[in-house]
Amino acid sequence: MSDAVDRDVTDRAAADRDVVVVGGGPAGCAAAVFAARAGLDVVVFDRGRSSLVRCAHLENYPGFPAGIDVGTLSDLMRAQAERAGCAVVEDLVESVERSEADADEPETERFIVGLQEGESVTARRVIAATRYDGEYLRGLDDDDAMFEVHDHGGETHEHFDREYADRDGTTPVEGLYVASPSEADRQAITAAGRGARVGKKVVADARIEDGWWPAAAEGVDWVRREAELDDEWTDRDRWVEWFDAEHADGPVDPDSERFARVREAAIDEALSSYVDADEEAARAAAGHRALAERLDPEAVVDAHGTDALLDAMDDEVIAAYAAGDGSNAGGDTDDTDAEPVDGGRR
């Protein structure tokens, strides 16, 4: 533990954050987005050391026909994490330790995350998403289990074992997940997929801790059109009937308060995933703008042509610019700090 870690944090009954993500590359950002959109309080610590920066130009990431430069992709991933509700902090995690739980309240056990510059942070769960260095995890489990030794150039080296975690990121240390790209996830897109899988597992585990059972805790994060709901499924009672039938043979008594509480939360989440046409259009426009903000203006002109851009602009704005009053001529507003859509969930 670094000297900067405040030992008093072990006395806190509640963690500062639900989830700490170490690393802001494709795996870390994907895990953070899925966790935050499910309502968890997430912070990402990143010092720009993702292995992605070694790539000159990324040409196999879906959605970018001519490829994308690493800087722009990194900016987009970070912006998406922030819009989902994550805090993204430029700091280096130096250590992760476990606090001691109260004897009568084992659930108060937390991770203490020591930082190079900032004050320590406590968290219920930690997602390790750094490819090159797992030294900050040393001491959480037996070194022989977490690290592997190999010889190179006549010297013995020790590094974090990337096969330490299960496929869903879980580890023998409760609350510790590993989304770090393994040998099978060395491409950016597969690393992002691993991060998403780990993020979904973190969400499911958090729900189970809150009284959900596994079959109910496993959700799908997507946004659907309200028009797809037929008359039958616009009725909440129909959703209640479906949930009751789906989980009738589950581990929780259907007549219990716990079952009713989880049912209400699950139905609320399902219904919130449907948006009307106006909301769909608004989200599409917001998505286009977020991309456009990170494009080189000259590239936009080259792609669309001057005439098309002038046609899209208000005549009064063009006249004001031509008259020499070009300040904020486009009527731009900085919405990078805008509130996440639906609290970051949808």
Image (spheres, rainbow, N blue to C red):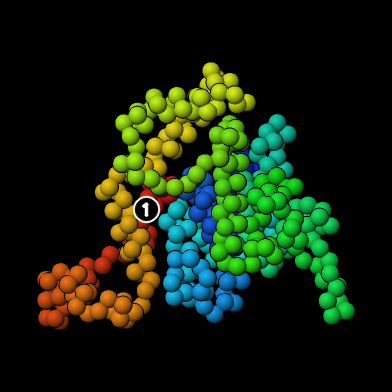
Left or right of 38: which side holds 186?
right
Q: Residue furthest right?
A: 154
Q: Is residue 72 above or below residue 12?
A: below
Residue 275 in the image: state x and y as whole percent.
33, 44
Q: Quadrant of residue 225?
A: top left
Q: Residue furthest top?
A: 255
Residue 118 in the image: state x and y as whole percent.
58, 62
Give the residue displayed 81% in from the left and 55% down from the top: 145
Give the residue displayed 37% in from the left and 50% down from the top: 341
Task: Tell me, yes or no, if residue 112 can be seen here.
Answer: no
Q: Secondary structure at mark 1?
A: loop
Q: Quadrant of residue 336?
A: bottom left
Q: Is residue 113 above or below residue 50?
A: above
Which residue type carries mark 1?
Glu
Judging depth in this view, the residue of 230 and 236 nearest the camera is 230
Left or right of 78: which side holds 133?
right
Q: Is residue 209 above or below residue 76?
A: above
Q: In the rendered picture of this protein, how many numbered marks are placed on residues?
A: 1
In the picture, the quarter occupied by the N terminus is: bottom right
Q: Which residue is mark 1?
A: 339
Task: Tell me, yes or no, if residue 184 can be seen here.
Answer: yes
Q: Is residue 122 above or below residue 90?
A: above
Residue 197 in the image: state x and y as whole percent.
59, 52
Left or right of 305: which side holds 88?
right
Judging depth in this view, the residue of 118 and 240 nearest the camera is 240
Left or right of 334: which side holds 119?
right
Q: Quadrant of residue 66?
A: bottom left
Judging depth in this view, the residue of 96 and 191 nearest the camera is 191
**Label 1, residues with CA under 10 Å away: few <14, some 14-19, many ≥20:** few
Give the residue displayed 45% in from the left and 53% down from the top: 84
Residue 64 in the image: state x and y as whole percent.
44, 70
Give the residue displayed 52% in from the left and 41% down from the top: 219
